[in-house]
Amino acid sequence: MKHYLSIKDIDSLSDWVSEARTLKANPMAHKNLGEGKTICLLFFNNSLRTRLSTQKAALNLGMDVMVMNFGSEGWQLEFEDGAVMNQGKSEHIKEAAKVVSQFCDIVAIRAFASLTDKEKDEAEIVLNGFKNYASIPVVNMESSVAHPLQALADAITIDEQHTKPRPKVVLSWAPHPKALPHAVANSFVEMMQLQNADFVITHPKGYELNPEITKDTVIEYDQEKAMENADFVYVKNWSSYSDYGKVISQDLDWMMTLEKLGNAKFMHCLPVRRNVVVEDAVLDGEQSLVIEQANNRTYAAQVVLKKILSSLTPKRGIKNDAL
Amino acid sequence: MKHYLSIKDIDSLSDWVSEARTLKANPMAHKNLGEGKTICLLFFNNSLRTRLSTQKAALNLGMDVMVMNFGSEGWQLEFEDGAVMNQGKSEHIKEAAKVVSQFCDIVAIRAFASLTDKEKDEAEIVLNGFKNYASIPVVNMESSVAHPLQALADAITIDEQHTKPRPKVVLSWAPHPKALPHAVANSFVEMMQLQNADFVITHPKGYELNPEITKDTVIEYDQEKAMENADFVYVKNWSSYSDYGKVISQDLDWMMTLEKLGNAKFMHCLPVRRNVVVEDAVLDGEQSLVIEQANNRTYAAQVVLKKILSSLTPKRGIKNDAL
Amino acid sequence: MKHYLSIKDIDSLSDWVSEARTLKANPMAHKNLGEGKTICLLFFNNSLRTRLSTQKAALNLGMDVMVMNFGSEGWQLEFEDGAVMNQGKSEHIKEAAKVVSQFCDIVAIRAFASLTDKEKDEAEIVLNGFKNYASIPVVNMESSVAHPLQALADAITIDEQHTKPRPKVVLSWAPHPKALPHAVANSFVEMMQLQNADFVITHPKGYELNPEITKDTVIEYDQEKAMENADFVYVKNWSSYSDYGKVISQDLDWMMTLEKLGNAKFMHCLPVRRNVVVEDAVLDGEQSLVIEQANNRTYAAQVVLKKILSSLTPKRGIKNDAL
């Protein structure tokens, strides 16, 4: 495997989930695999779970980790081809990506959607900039339109927790005071499309996700109806896709409650706004899987890094020959 | 030992000091103890000594270290139970603490006093938030009301430097342009109460520390009288406790000078304002122990981490079972 | 070797370059040399290449690395002797440098020129502050007036790429929207003065570098003439030295183009403003060595750290004896 940019880079979800669970049972089993290898984690946005879990996964594999807040510690990047760089941006992605490739073996990138420019967001200029110009594998730590490490952790969690061969899974939109990106929802949808599951999306009208992602997934505007007999309910806010990046409803009737949840397990990627997205009783109750999901972030990252490391050819010290 | 939150977590000061001095003589002796274990250092405030010494102590024990500036790199935390999180705060301490616990074996926290809300400061909402919701040991890297790693380093330093069985130790308030917390003074007082020492506190009227901490410790408002025959003088500014967080005096007559110091050794936790808190001649002279104190920060942290590591039961990879 | 502060600390350029190339061929050959040793990288300014390459070099030598953004994560430093510290600065360089020396074995510093106060910049108050008060070796990761790790990487690159015993090397000024320091140009000039090369500097009138650095190096104001038969062209912007820190020309006629370059190899330290400093066709063409230069930053740092490590006497755990 070269890169891990989206759910599409998973060749067999069941194999990956199975391997992640094996790693979870014995996280240090491949401590030698990453010896002498370095991963750079480059953050263009804040992070808690992704920062710590990806670092932990790399350490479990014996890698060295270099963490950098690119925005505040590095140089402002230009992404346009042919730009005359006489304004605020000091370095072009072409150089930045190639340069980073000299100092590490894998680079992981977090760069959120702007939510102001749909076209630029969908072009994934930061992630694809690194993909196009780096000479090393690139891992997506949440980009404009995808968060495939989160979705893989979610798949591991469902695999651990499901009791039926074909569980019913609902993705339920929730209110939120701020406009949030579509990345988590998108990757969860794509991942569910690979699962053997009865999958339904529910949200107020106007909150339809990108139809190229939802495809023929059932969309049910009546939350109560959508949740009937659900086994897992994944709650998440996102801003409007059609009226791009706008908050068109903050209707608290869409907040998840213990009553609505019934017997379903509750999932959320975190961070979560208590008593806006979901009431305390759900998060503090026994049906919540959010901490399990967070824990599985480590093993999702670890299976990805393990697969990338396994496919690296030894080339230390002669890297520049490849340029 | 579960946590290291205050001086009260030291079961035998003399044993700890003795163990720290043994570690100092051979810092790498327990390099295998922390193998495969990770500590997260979470900073809600700036740090130099604490950041580097705690990191160094962990490295000496073979641990992996993940450092994070929680304020700028993570999410703004909510601490109130039952809060409706529709304002600026993105994540509740309940989730944050549990999540961090998934990725490391020990978490260390720095979160200063606000000096604006005495009740909240004394509730230690950040430190206690982590203590209450984390499933791993918590170390205090300076909280609102305590700095027990500093006090332990101070105890090590006094133990190394004392020449009398019962030295006279003075804690002397000093002027400062800004309002500073009480944490260092509090923990030094509590630590001295455990020592075999003749201990006196001196400060202008109105600068009394929390009486629940000073208890029956002698307070002498005449600095000159307090310092008679002192063996160690610990100088430190703090803001008013009764008129909470206020600077009620900047009287430079309280600055420590070589003349006042007599034959005593000079101590300060650093950073220190030269020629405001203490004159150059003291810091640049042979009676100053400030660099020794800083050096001992490593071994104070190392003895704490060693004790915590020794009490950890192996549980890697099955962490989620404990939830 | 004690410190690496400037090109003057290189005792034999040819030996160092040769050793760097040996390290590049086998970067892990001295993985045990740095075992149990720690380097602190202290950044007073932003960094990409220097941050990652110096970290990588240290890891290649088996060292532990502690990275700190001193400005934002630590305390604001006072550098004046005898200062009454009753303003914004919390800690004096005397304490900061001595304290850092307690926690690591080597300290590396990045502190750019202010470009507002020539005297202070030339006094190198940050770098020399650490040199004067630290008890451990100090490495310059770009100071006010020098960037010797960059220049060493440049020397390695020229050594790898040259085809003539005495190549012609041109340092050509380029336009830039912002006022930039002289550090890179200075160190490149000093390094070229040690090389067996036909070396020429070209720039508009008014952009003369410090004559104490350029000495008798040929300065040719006609760029075209300067570049005749060049083998290597090093392009770099700097602000005026005589009219200190001012931008006195942004003349795009000085931008490097493929046409001007002829058969020469193109060098730049990066980050570079495309189509201002140099046109795309040069950077995207085969004559550009910029990524090689960046790659060689690791081996420049590694040879420096290796020499310092080799000269360290074992003193762990008894460090405070030396105070």
Image (spheres, coloured by chain):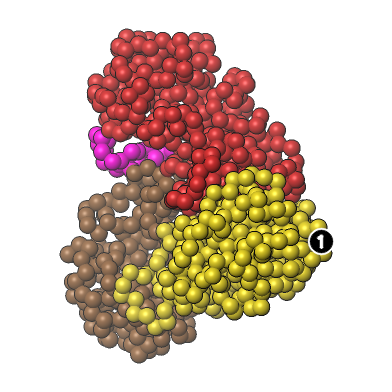
Chain colours: A yellow, B red, C brown
Q: Secondary structure at mark 1?
A: loop
Residue B203, quarter of picture? top left
Q: Position of residue C198 (x, y in %)?
A: 35, 78
Residue indicated by mark 1: A164
Give the chain letter at badge 1. A
Q: Is residue A60 on the magenta stretch?
A: no
- Residue B73 in the figure: left or right of residue A316: left
What type is the residue that disc 1 sits on? Answer: Lys
Bounds of the magenta segment: C77-99
- Residue B211 in the figure: left or right of residue C84: right
Asked if one can make out residue A36 in the rendered structure from this viewpoint, the answer is no
Q: Position of residue B91 (x, y in %)?
A: 52, 49
Where the C terminus of chain A falls, by quadrant? Answer: bottom right
Residue C242, quarter of picture? bottom left
Q: Is residue C91 on the magenta stretch?
A: yes
Q: Is residue A70 above or below residue A272?
A: below
- Residue B158 in the figure: left or right of residue A21: left
Q: Residue at x 41, y 58 (%)?
A: A72
Q: Residue at x 48, y 63 (%)?
A: A249
Q: Position of residue A152 (x, y in %)?
A: 68, 64
Viewer-proximal residue, A278 or A21? A278
Q: Answer few, some or many: residues within 10 Å of disc 1's Cα (few below 14, many 20 plus, some between 14 and 19).
A: few
Q: Position of residue B212 (x, y in %)?
A: 47, 17
- Residue B255 in the figure: left or right of residue A304: left
Q: Is residue A112 above or below residue B318?
A: below
